[in-house]
Amino acid sequence: RGGEGRMDSAEVQRKLGMGVQKILSLPEAPVARRTEAEASAFQDFRDAVKASRRDPEELLGGFAEEDMREALLFVRRRGSEKKLQSRQAKECVTILLSHSAWLAVSTRDTELKDSLREFMSDHPDVQAKLDSAPELAGVGSVRAAPRPRPKMEGTREQEIRSLLFRARDIMRGLGWEFGSSRGDFDQATEGCRFLYEAMNKLSKVCKVPPGGSSSDDDAAVDLGGLVLQQCNIEWAQVLRFLHSMHGSGSRKTWHARIAFISATLEQYSPEYQVAVVESPPPWRP
């Protein structure tokens, strides 16, 4: 993976937040995909942490104490279980512990501290840092988490994923085109219905309550983006399908739903955002 040096500070912090969110969501990943999910979470989080090296004290702040603890435990466990990634995991730990809050979390938790000392046995400088670091009272007050992390029930996330995969399978089977026969029309409409239901559920789960702050909005976008990212769907092809359905002239009653689907995807999927820029849809104002 390349290009981490080109990220600006806001992008680094966004990717760090997404990386932590992926780690925290691992217990909800289907057993059949757990290995893939863990590998992806480690790679994404590692890339973001490496990009924070230029100013760790600024870029690594803003996480809840428990979230930092879970992320450190995951990195340590990954490095211990996957010997080929041990060096990468140790690099991550070194960078993370250069931030006062992450170091304080490691010091406050004896179990975490001991496991990190053992894991970093060939890094005496890090061990010394763990031994000498002051235990900051109320680590969370060092820098308050900028956005509360909304929870998504595992069953609800599974419902959304199931609908998305059913929609994808239909659209892919039609070559990402709306179709030219009556049978294709009905099948394509069914696929779009699954996609509409998925977006409707996703928008409700990620809806920010009245009076919510801009940080609540950011957290909702992160959560929705994570769900869509983990599905690994070809979002540019989905846009192609929506284009063809909108332009077919045979399902005009679906135009408003197509616009809603597209707006929701654009809100939560960076890949779909790029596709929209490259192929602007006619339903956008």
Image (cartoon, helix red, strand yellow):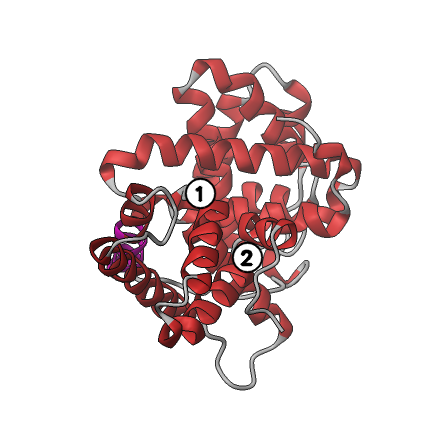
Residue 74 falls in which quadrant of the image? Answer: top left
Q: Residues within 10 Å of mark 1 (few under 14, many from 20)?
A: few
Q: Is residue 117 above or below residue 186?
A: above
Q: Which residues are magenta?
A: 154-166
**Amino acid of disc 2:** Ala
Q: Residue at x 46, y 74 (%)?
A: 207
Please tell me whether the stretch drawn in magenta is mainly helix, strand or loop.
helix
Q: Which residue is mark 2?
A: 64
Q: Please indicate whether residue 155 sits to the left or right of residue 54 in the image.
A: left
Is any atom of residue 135 visible in this view?
A: no
Q: Residue at x 43, y 21 (%)?
A: 80
Q: Is residue 227 above or below residue 259?
A: above
Label 1 element class: loop
Q: Please indicate whether residue 32 sits to the left or right of residue 212 in the image.
A: left
Residue 44 in the image, given as x and y percentages of width and height: 54, 36
78, 100: nearer the viewer: 78
Residue 122 in the image, given as x and y percentages of width and height: 59, 14
Q: Residue furthest left?
A: 183
Q: Which residue is mark 1?
A: 234
Q: Residue at x 33, y 61 (%)?
A: 192
Q: Are marks 2 and 1 in contact (CB under 8 Å)?
A: no
